[in-house]
Image (tube, rainbow, N blue to C red):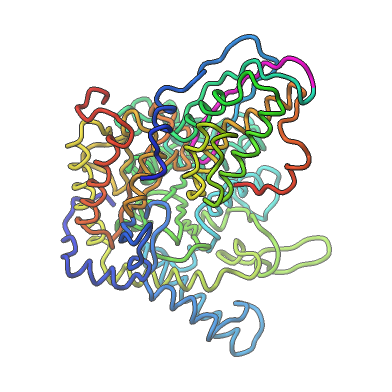
Amino acid sequence: MDLYQELIIEHSKRPHRAGLRQPFEAEVHHVNPTCGDEVTVRVHVSGAGPDAVLEDVSYDALGCSISVASASIMAQEITGHPLRDAATTYAAVRSMLTSKGVDQGDEEVIGDGVALSGVARYPARVKCALLGWMALEDALAQAGHALRGSENRTQEGTS
Amino acid sequence: MTAPVTAEAFSSAEVARIRADVPILARTVREDRPLVYLDSGATSQKPGSVLDAEREWYERFNAAPHRGAHALSEEGTEAYESARLRIAAFVGAAHDEIVFTKNATEALNLVAYAFSNAATGGGGGSGERFRIGPGDEIVVTEMEHHANLIPWQELARRTGATLRWIGVRDDGRLELDGIENVVTERTKVVSFTHQSNVLGTITPVRRIAELAREAGAVSVLDACQSVPHMPVTVTELGVDLLAFSGHKMLGPMGVGALWGRAEVLDEMPVFLTGGSMIETVTMESATYAPVPQKFEAGVPNAAQAIGLAAACDYLTDLGMARVAAHEHLLTARILEGLAERPWVRVVGPTDLTERGGAVAFVVDGVHAHDVGQVLDHEGVAVRVGHHCAWPLHRRMGVTATTRVSVHAYNTVEEIDVFLAALDLVPAVFGVSTTGAGAR
């Protein structure tokens, strides 16, 4: 079935950059109460404002293949990048996941994230794919960084 | 309750007739695959007669029951009370021992709040047996649905009483060794499930109820997973109060019931207050109507109550002993099929002794959500997650399970479709089927 592309299975079986590491400025723990999936995310950021760099995103994900693969792809695509780029990637991933299949995702922007495009057609699973990202956004907020600008926060629906 | 299976399972022709009565079973899902509905433990599908009964209420009787003296109100009241009578008869109760609620969750909360109200001297109940406070104990089990756990956690918090529980063994049965140290003279209420919504385990109701009685505690049974699936005569179980839900027994959503022995309900303080549940009212205070009216504040869910009565009529026509026998047959096929697959592990009893038709399992190396997704793609609807029993999952050492659950309208062929769909799972996720990973 189209949901489980090879890339998703690979990421879920061998998640990239998994494990919790030092140093970090903030750590958060998020759960999906419907299934009990859990993720812990730590962020290590240097600098301030949009030019701040995501030096390390480390995580411990316990859950379905979609939630683990999504966390793995997230860490892979944004680690080492400026916050500005991470915000763009996040916005593009959210847009794809909440588009009900209309937005197939741009590999130039979200890299392996395009493998998650099939999730958008299964509303019950969108939450799984967003779990790690929501935790990242929260962790960054606690560390004093905004992953979403006010301009793209208003129009997005929740899954 | 759990007598040996004596009745006959339905023949193929009989199941075909039942299926023809339930319109939704004719639909397809996910690219025109026939729907294989194996999630009746969550909610059951409805025969046309139930839907007709709800519609008939609004087309012929719609008026506030027990209010007004016009023709519609009189007929509406009669229809509503006739529903109560038929539902009471279905579970072997007297008609004034059935209280309509929104669902079993509300019925259980009603009881928990009655205890709270007694603790503060409110609610108009006279019963010493509902008075609870510091030093008193509330007993549940580790296999409860959240609906029969959280109301008691909250009651303990409000009153200073202590929450205790009967544990669950590795085989999915209650730990009865040492139960006399859990249910003691300090126990004020023992609230437990008749059949686990996850494991399918049927609990020894009479024994636990007897222990509660000896301790002077009120016993409450969550019968959500038993009343829909087996013959239940409430007066034979030894419990004081019993909750069940309409939508799990072919009835509509939005209606459930609390049964109680008359003298227990009589002593029990009220929960929700307002119209219809009063005797007299002044600006300062009120006195309350007799049971069951004192527990039914506000205009009731009459259409749903009548729909539930139609469901009881339907199940009575099928014969609950035959429903149980049919589900027994399907459960045997499920357990056999899962046992043949070493990469699958059943969580809960693996034989048919004292168990109902809800079977939870894990595929080692694959998350339940992913198992459910593959099944769904083949048209097979199952439940995945913790099924509102998170502590039980933690106890069994799993984060989530896949659960199949059956009802009268399921066929042996559907179980085979489910098993065939399950066989697609290992390949999708690249896990071994040799049993190396199975525990």
Answer yes or no: is residue B269 visible.
yes
Q: Given the current orientation, which residue lies at the most extreme front position?
A: A108
In this view, B412 is above or below A111: below
Could you say where residue B55 lies in the image, as x and y percent from the top left?
49, 79
Q: Which quarter shows the C terminus of chain B? A: top left
Could you say where residue B428 lies in the image, as x and y percent from the top left?
31, 37
In this view, A20 is above or below B218: above
What residue is shown at x 52% (from left), y 54% (from top)?
B264
Image-quadrant location for residue B410: bottom left
What residue is shown at x 43% (from left), y 48% (from top)?
B221
In this view, B214 is above or below B252: above
Q: Given the current orientation, which residue lies at the most extreme right position?
A: B283
Could you say where residue B186 lies in the image, as x and y percent from the top left?
53, 31
What residue is shown at x 49% (from left), y 67% (from top)?
B96
Q: Is residue B86 left or right of residue A23?
A: left
Q: Is residue B371 magenta?
A: no
Q: Is residue B242 left or right of residue A44?
A: left
Taking depth in this image into account, of B77 and B409 the one nearest to the observer is B409
Dominant secondary structure of the residues highlighted in magenta in the image = strand
Answer yes or no: is residue B179 visible.
no
Taking depth in this image into account, of B26 and B148 the one nearest to the observer is B26
Could you say where residue B317 lies in the image, as x and y percent from the top left?
28, 72
What residue is shown at x 47% (from left), y 37% (from top)?
A115
Q: Is residue A34 magenta?
A: yes
In this view, A14 is above or below B344: above
Taking depth in this image into account, of A101 and B128 the one nearest to the observer is A101
Span colored in magenta: A31-48
Q: Given the current orientation, which residue lies at the most extreme bottom position?
A: B71
